[in-house]
Image: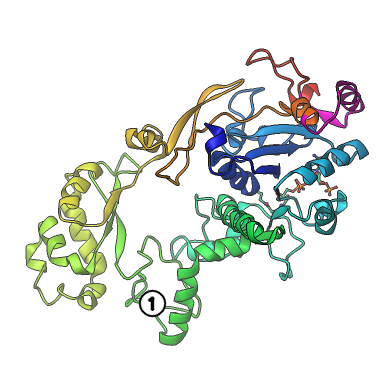
Amino acid sequence: MTDTLPLAGIKVIDFTGVQAGPACTQLLAWFGADVLKVERTSGGDVTRNQLRDIPDADALYFTMLNSNKRSLAIDTKTPEGLAVMEQLIRVSDVLVENFAPGAMDRMGLSWEHIQELNPGLVYGSVKGFNDESSYADLKVYENVAQAAGGALSTTGFWDGPPTVSAAALGDSNTGMHLAIGILTALLSREKTGQGQKVSVSMQDAVLNLCRVKLRDQQRLERVGHLEEYPQYPNGTFTDVVPRGGNAGGGGQPGWVLKCKGWEDDPNAYIYFTIQEQNWARTCEAIGKPEWADDPDHRTAAARQERLFDIFAGIEEWLADKTKYEAVDILRTYEVPCAPVLSMKELAYDSDLRKSGTVVEVEQKQRGTYLTVGSPIKFSDFTPTITGAPLLGEHTDEVLAELGYDADQIAAMHADGAVGGARTGELSAPGDVVTASQQ
Ligand code: CAO
């Protein structure tokens, strides 16, 4: 099955950690690439140990970003480890890294040297800021990127502080951008035979998703207000895009509305959108048919001034309906809306299980756990999600593939240049060499 997947035969060196890089390489692995995670001998990717829910088992943070991969544990700061890395670069198609700025150069793996080793290699790199930025030297995590990319200043309520989004706009989003860049460079290589460096900065990737706010900055500078924001027409605007709470970002006003049970259930809400072209049916749906032709409600301009009174009226209609009942009625009137779903509801959602968007995976040391499957659906194949590798689980296998013999491999283990379980040691799921034992 794996041999027939679209990216079968593409060898990827996954020299990444935490979330941004691993999310990119995991996607390539799902689509059939042979993704080899290269990790430090002591502990590996830091997420193996972060936020553990089972002592001595790799954390979900790691397993949910590293499925379908193999793991090689080497110390690239030893001459033997660096030689292994160079040999891997010679025989691979793609290398992805997201280390701190300068770390690859310090390791002796500059882009110039990588090109000498393999001119056909596609080199994918994530940094916090792009090369032209005066912040290019900074180390960056998710929320730092959200701050720098415009998400923080535009998220939250107008009377509260800048607010982070739960969605990984800085991390996974950057990884997805990088995956697109890598696949593009691979297609380019088909024509030219040449590899190239593909860089994505987290600031740039966040801003790319915040493009409507850049739109709003220019509109604000031209007309002095933003008609779809709750501040209009009764509040004040400054010269920067304000935080708009739960307002819709496009031309159709929307808001989060309370449903039956909101007093006790933090997620008893729906998101409701007033679609301009569907106004008459929307009025029918919410039991206010008189609003359809009323001059105070008939046009978008008239509604704008009394938007929050309209939402309050809809909440009266919602008071005796659960979020599911409300959506079931509103959908028959083609009102764009959805229940606000909790993570618990999503985890046990049978539709998401059926579509493979949420999958149950078997993991050594852990048993089964839930993770996300591919959100990209193909007509010709369905990606199968498998467990994540243990630290150095494939060290010996990979070294043998590179031509090292058993004595050389043993010597490298003895020197500490490589790590992980020795061949044959992983006979049972619980039989694992943990970081602390290495
Ligand atoms: N063998 C030997 N050394 C290794 C190694 C290996 N297999 N793998 C990594 N290292 C070394 C690196 O060479 C580096 O050494 P130097 O500091 O001496 O150059 C060291 O480990 C630490 O690398 P790091 O990049 O992981 O550094 P960090 O933990 O201090 O910073 C992070 C982490 C994420 C802030 C930083 O990597 C970064 O800014 N990356 C770019 C942006 C990014 O991707 N952030 C998203 C992370 S997801 O939230």
Most distant residue in the bottom direction: 222
Horizontal side of residue 266 vs 298, given as left or right: right
Left/right placement of residue 114 relative to residue 50 reads right
| Residue 142 can be seen, yes or no | yes
Residue 195, above or below 88 = below
Q: Nearer the viewer, residue 40 or 403?
A: 403
Residue 364 x %, y %: 60, 21
Residue 425 vertical placement versus 36 (above, below):
above
In this view, 316 is above or below 211:
above
| Residue sitting at x 83%, y 51% | 117
Which residues are the magenta region?
Answer: 401-420
Residue marked by disc 1: 226
In this image, 283 relative to 94: left or right?
left
397 in relation to 239, above or below: above
Residue 216, image quadrant? bottom left
The residue type indicated by label 1 comes to Leu
Q: Residue at x 33, y 32 (%)?
A: 350
Please name the residue shown 84% across and 36% down the image: 75
State the image quarter where residue 336 is shown.
bottom left
Location of residue 171 in the rendering, given as x and y in whole percent from the top left corner: 59, 51
Tell me, yes or no, whether the highlighted magenta stretch contains residue 410: yes
The reply, left or right, for residue 348 in relation to residue 217 is: left
- Circle 1: element type: loop
